[in-house]
C-alpha cells in the first residue's frame, strides 16, 4: 500500500482544509475594550466635573486604551474575515 492510499474497500478520508486564523476573535476583544473605554471615559469626566478623585478612573482608562491600541496593532497582522456566519 502506498502512502496516502485508502485500504481496499474503503473510501479515502477527505483532507480537512487548513483553518486560516482570522481576526474575528480580535474584533470581539477590540469591541469589548472599546465599550469599557467609553464607560471609563464618561466616569472619568464625570468625576472631574463633580470635583471627586478621578485618578484611578483615569488610570483604568489609560490601561484600557493601551490594551486597545495593542489589540488593534495585532489585528492588522491577521487576514480579514472571509467566512460568513452559518444560519
Image (cartoon, rainbow, N blue to C red):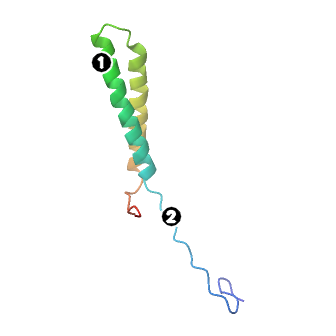
State the residue at coordinates (40%, 61%).
85
Q: Residue at x 38, y 9 (%)?
A: 53
Q: Residue at x 29, y 9 (%)?
A: 50
How busy is the neighbourhood of tag 2: few (under 14 within 10 Å), some, or many (20 plus)?
Answer: few
Most foreground residue, 17 or 41: 41
Which residue is labeled 2 in the image? 19
What residue does disc 1 label? Answer: 45
Give how far across and how far down residue 17 sits, in percent. 51, 71
Q: In this view, does 60 lie above or below 22?
A: above
Identify the image quadrant of the N terminus.
bottom right
Residue plotted at (65% across, 83% down): 4
Residues under numbered marks 2 and 1 in contact, where contact means CB atoms less than 8 Å apart: no
Looking at this view, name the residue that lies furthest to the bottom: 8
Which mark's residue is nearer the viewer, 2 or 1?
1
Judge the density around disc 1: few (<14), some (14-19), many (≥20) Cα neighbours within 10 Å.
Answer: some
Q: Is mark 2 on a helix, strand or loop?
A: loop
Q: Tag count in the figure?
A: 2
Residue 82: x percent and y percent?
A: 38, 62
| Quadrant assignment, res 14 | bottom right
Question: From this viewpoint, is residue 10 visible?
Answer: yes
Q: Report helix, strand or loop for mark 1.
A: helix
CA–CA distance between discs 2 and 1?
44 Å
Earlier residue among tags 2 and 1:
2
Residue 73 occupies quadrant: top left
Residue 6 at x, y percent in the picture: 66, 87
Amino acid at each position: 500500500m502506498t502512502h496516502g492510499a485508502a485500504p481496499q474497500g474503503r473510501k479515502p478520508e477527505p483532507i480537512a482544509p487548513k483553518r486560516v486564523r482570522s481576526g474575528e476573535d480580535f474584533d470581539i476583544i477590540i469591541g469589548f475594550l472599546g465599550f469599557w473605554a467609553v464607560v471609563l471615559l464618561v466616569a472619568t469626566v464625570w468625576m472631574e466635573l463633580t470635583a471627586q478623585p478621578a485618578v484611578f478612573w483615569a488610570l483604568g482608562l489609560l490601561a484600557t486604551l493601551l490594551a486597545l491600541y495593542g489589540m488593534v496593532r495585532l489585528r492588522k497582522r491577521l487576514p480579514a474575515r472571509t467566512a460568513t456566519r452559518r444560519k
